[in-house]
Image (cartoon, helix red, strand yellow):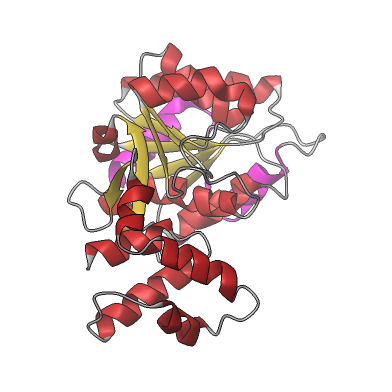
Amino acid sequence: MNRDLLLRLALCQELGIQKKWWALSYAKKYGRETLTFGDLQRLFGYQRFSPRLESSWQALAGDGLAEALTGQDYLTIDSPLYPEQLRQLHYPPLALFYAGRRELLQKRLLGFVGARDASSYGRQVVSKFIPEMVAANYVIVSGLARGIDSYAHMATLASSGFTIGVLGNGLDVCYPAENRRLYEILQKEHLVITEYPLGTPPKKYHFPQRNRIIAGLCKGLCVVEAKARSGSLITAQQALEAGREVFAVPGEILSGRQDGCHSLIQDGAKCVYRPQDLLEELPEF
């Protein structure tokens, strides 16, 4: 792969990940070292958004690319340090921007996700499971969102383990703002990663994309608390599509807080109610 083209596509905010891969495949097929805006326009038929795409693409030409990368640490998909499991996705990130200990990406990774409005029950489940996973040398991966994600990160810290936060925005943006202290700790002592360059704000459509990274990185994904329609179920589906094992924690049936977990169990996810349930399954993956 041509490194400059790879990075230019990774930084371009007017193209989704699928179109970035289409463009890269086109360049590879026809032996192109670079692509012009005209190439992209012919490839995608852009009209309404063409001025924005043209402006973004031209700004990343020549010295503009180096300037855009200033102050950012990153791994491109052709790097030997890029996580092999993530390469297995249909459309993996072309680049991962990171802050912290990138070597954590080479460890055994286990994802924990769940409701943003986590209940006391959900928090207790996290507090019960995480220490055992840390003791078994798993690095805990989650999305640094409020609720179960935050509790998973904090329980890992309390257990003297390591954790990775996956963002749906640039590394210079803390979202949600209430997690500022947690975010700073992860940046300095653990790891925070994203496929979005500096200056990228959080947008609604970024989070399903963020979730696929969580799903792709991990050997398994544990859903602690999820309603029938939630981002956690999207992450679980993405994990299944990536060939990962999905675990779901059952709960009470009246409030609806666990409906998503119960649906996952009905659909074949492993029902787990003890940390040992996870540990018995994970060595096979």
Viewed as shown, does residue 224 lie left or right of 25? right
Q: From the image, which quarter does the N terminus lie in?
A: bottom left
Give the image location of residue 242, x and y in percent. Answer: 41, 58
* Residue at 67%, 40% in the rendered image: 226
Residue 22 location, quadrant: bottom left
Residue 284 location, quadrant: top left
Q: In the rendered view, tell whether residue 106 sits above or below residue 119.
A: below
Question: Taking the image as drawn, is residue 16 in sight?
Answer: no
Residue 259 within the magenta-colored segment of the rendering = yes
Residue 233 within the magenta-colored segment of the rendering = no
Q: In the rendered view, tell whether residue 105 sits above or below residue 22.
A: above
Question: Residue farthest to the right?
Answer: 254
Viewed as shown, does residue 165 lie left or right of 67? right
Between 15 and 38, the one nearer to me in the picture: 38
Q: Which contiguous range is marked in magenta?
A: 258-285
Between 101 and 196, the one nearer to me in the picture: 196
Between 45 and 257, the one nearer to me in the picture: 45
Give the image location of residue 81, x and y in percent. Answer: 20, 46
Residue 145 location, quadrant: top right
How many labels, in total? 0
* Residue at 35%, 64% in the rendered image: 61
Question: Residue farthest to the front?
Answer: 63
The dominant secondary structure in magenta is helix
* Residue at 43%, 50% in the rendered image: 195
* Residue at 27%, 84% in the rendered image: 29
Give the image location of residue 265, x and y in percent. Answer: 59, 48
Viewed as shown, does residue 95 lie left or right of 214? left
Viewed as shown, does residue 280 lie left or right of 254? left
Give the image location of residue 184, x and y in percent. Answer: 46, 21
Question: Taking the image as drawn, is residue 283 in sight?
Answer: yes
